[in-house]
Amino acid sequence: MRRGTNLPRMAGFNQTVILDVVRRADAGLSRAQLARRTGLSAQTVTNATRRLLEQGLVREEGETSRPGPGRPGTLLHLDARGRYAIGVHLDPAVMTFVVLDLAGNPVAQLQEPTPVPDQPERVVAGLVRAIEELVDSSGIDRTLILGVGIATPGPIDVEQGVVMDPPHLPGWHGVPLRDAVAEGTGLPVILDKDTIAAASAHLWNPGVHRSTDFMFFYLGTGVAMSLVIRDDVVRGSSGNAGEAGHFVVDPGGETCECGKRGCLGAVLRAETLVNQGVEAGVISHPGSLSDPREIDTAFSALCAAADAGDTRAVSVLEVAGRRLGMAAVVITDLCDLDTVIVGGPLWSRMEPHAMPALEKHVAAHQVPGGAHSIAVLTSPLGPQVGAVGAGCLVLGQAFTPRPSDLMLDA
Ligand SMILES: [Zn+2]
C-alpha cells in the first residue's frame, strides 16, 4: 500500500526516474548509460539531466572508462549535499534526531530524554525546539531540507498523521503530531510507525546486507517486528503491521496485559528484564516502574553488570535472546525469509549477551527442505535506526516517481 504525501515534489517524473537510477550507481553513469537503463530517449535524458544539474541534485565528475563507439561520456553522480531530510524517532524514554544527506548518510545528530512523556504538548514543543537546534548547529541551508519524517510507537492513523493510543505513551490519545510539528517548524512532515521506519532504513542502505526478504526485530520500549518481502516493507491494511508483542514464547512466563502468559512483548520488555535483574540480585529496584526513563536507567545497569561478567545478569539476557530466536524461526519459515536483523535501543545494550543465544537457536533450526540458511545480524544503525529510517521515508518519497508528475513533465 502506497500512501499520498504532503511533501513537495523534488523533480518531475522522468527526472525522478533518472535520479533514482543515478543514486543506485556508485560509480556514476553517462547519459548514454542512463538512456539504456531507463528506456528513455537520449533527448529526454539530456533535458532531464540538465534540470537535475540546475537543481543541484546531480553533479558531473569523470568519464566512462571504456566508451564504446563515439566520445567518452561524462559521468553523472548523485549530489549528496543537494538536499537533506530530517529523521525523528520519538520513543517514550528518548528522542533521537538525525539529518540525512540525499544519499541517506547521517550528517548531524542529536539525542535527548523525552520531556514528560505523558504530556503530548510538552513533547511536541521539545521536539520542535530540538529540530530547530539541530538544523542551526548543522549549518545546512534550510531551503534544502525536503521535510521531516517522524517515527513513533503505533498504533497511528497514517492518513491523518495522528498518534492513536500507544500503550507505551500514556496520555496520548489521538494526538495530531504530524500537523503540530509541521506548524511548529514550517517544514513538511510525514508520520509513520517506528518499526516500519526502521525496516525502511535497511532497505535504503543496501550496503548493510543483500537480502530482499528479511525480518527486523525492533526492541525498544515495546517489541515489534517488521517484514520486508521483495524489497518492500509490509504495511498492512492500516499501516500498522508488525505488532509481534503477543506471540507466545514462554507459556509459563510473565503475564501479559492481554491476559495470556509469556507473550514476546511481556517477556522481552525492559521492565520484565529489569524485574528479573532485581530478583536475581543484580540491580536494585528502580524508583518507579511507570517511568520509562527510570526503567531505561535500570536496564543499562543490568547490561553493564553482564558486561562486567555477572553471570546472573548474563543469564537474564541469554534467555531473552533464546526467546527472540523462538519467535524468529516461526516467522522465517512462514515467509521464507533468509535474514533476521535485530536492532533498537534495548538491543544495542543487550546484544553482546543475547546475540549468541539467538544465533544458536536459529542455527539449530531446520529450514524446511534445507532450502537456505538464515543469517542473523545486528543492525549497524544502532539506537539511531528509527530516526534514520524516518529520514529514509522522506528520501524514499522524494525518489519515488509519482504518476501525477507525468502531467507536468515535458
Ligand atoms: Zn499478550
Image (spheres, helix red, strand yellow):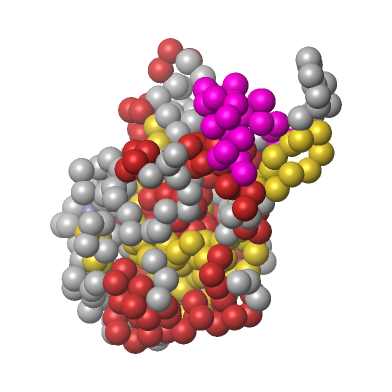
- The x, y position of residue 29, in whole percent, is 69, 33
Question: Toward the viewer: 150 or 301?
Answer: 150
Q: In this picture, is 409 found above or below 256?
A: above
Whether residue 62 sits left or right of residue 331 in the image: it is right
Which residue corresponds to the image point at 37% horizontal and 39% vertical from the top-left?
406
Check residue 32 for magenta coloring. yes
Q: Give the quadrant of residue 149.
A: bottom left
The residue range painted magenta reads 26-50
Q: In this picture, is 321 found above or below 185?
A: above
Q: Which quadrant, please, contains the C terminus?
A: top left
Question: Toward the viewer: 161 or 368?
Answer: 161
- Regarding residue 166, the answer to whether it shows in the image is no
Q: Which quadrant, please, contains the N terminus?
A: top left
- The x, y position of residue 213, in whole percent, is 45, 31
- Regarding residue 158, the answer to whether it shows in the image is yes
Q: Main secondary structure of the magenta part?
A: helix
Q: In this picture, is 148 found above or below 285?
A: above
Which residue corresponds to the image point at 74% horizontal and 44% vertical from the top-left?
60
Which residue corresponds to the image point at 56% horizontal and 61% vertical from the top-left?
84
Q: Quadrant of ligand 1?
A: bottom left
Question: Toward the viewer: 212 or 17?
Answer: 17
- The x, y position of residue 377, in whole percent, is 57, 42
Check residue 82 for magenta coloring. no
- The x, y position of residue 78, in whole percent, is 65, 46
Q: Give the quadrant of residue 75.
A: top right
Which residue corresponds to the image point at 31% horizontal and 69% vertical from the top-left?
178
Question: Toward the viewer: 107 or 340?
Answer: 107
Q: Give the quadrant of residue 394.
A: bottom left
Tally of numbered tags? 0
